[in-house]
Amino acid sequence: MEELIPIFAIFCIFIGLPWIIFHYGTRNRAAQGLSREDEKMLADLWQLANRMERRLESLETILDTRAAGWREKP
């Protein structure tokens, strides 16, 4: 049994420790990026924001022609 302790220690140092470091290093790098679902949601939100911006610009144009001076009113 005592002969196995140095072999186990060497195994842990040269095999186990690097495996743990590489394993969690890879997981952290993968977690830093966006998932496909997140990318799709972000693209959808970007499209909705662009549509809302166009609508606001249209509304401001209409208000400029029909109610001049609306920007100065509190």
Image (cartoon, grey):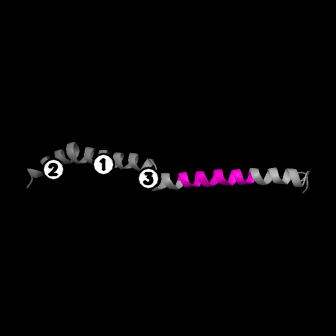
Q: What range is drawn magenta here?
A: 42-56
Q: Residues within 10 Å of mark 2 (few under 14, many from 20)?
A: few
Q: For this rendering, which residue is in front, 59 or 33? A: 59
Label disc, if present, on residue 23 of the rendered structure = 1
Q: Residue, x 21% and y 42% (percent of image)?
A: 14
Please report contact status of discs 1 and 2: CB closer than 8 Å, yes or no. Answer: no
| SS under mark 2 | helix
The amino acid marked with disc number 3 is: Arg
- In the rendered image, the quadrant that contains the C terminus is bottom right
Residue 13, quarter of picture: top left
Q: Nearer the viewer, mark 1 or mark 3?
A: 3
Query: How far apart in space, not on screen, are marks 3 and 2 (Cα)?
Result: 42 Å
Residue at label 3?
36
Residue at label 2?
8
Q: For this rendering, which residue is in front, 34 or 3? A: 34
Residue 41 position, x and y percent, is: 52, 56
Residue 47 position, x and y percent, is: 59, 52
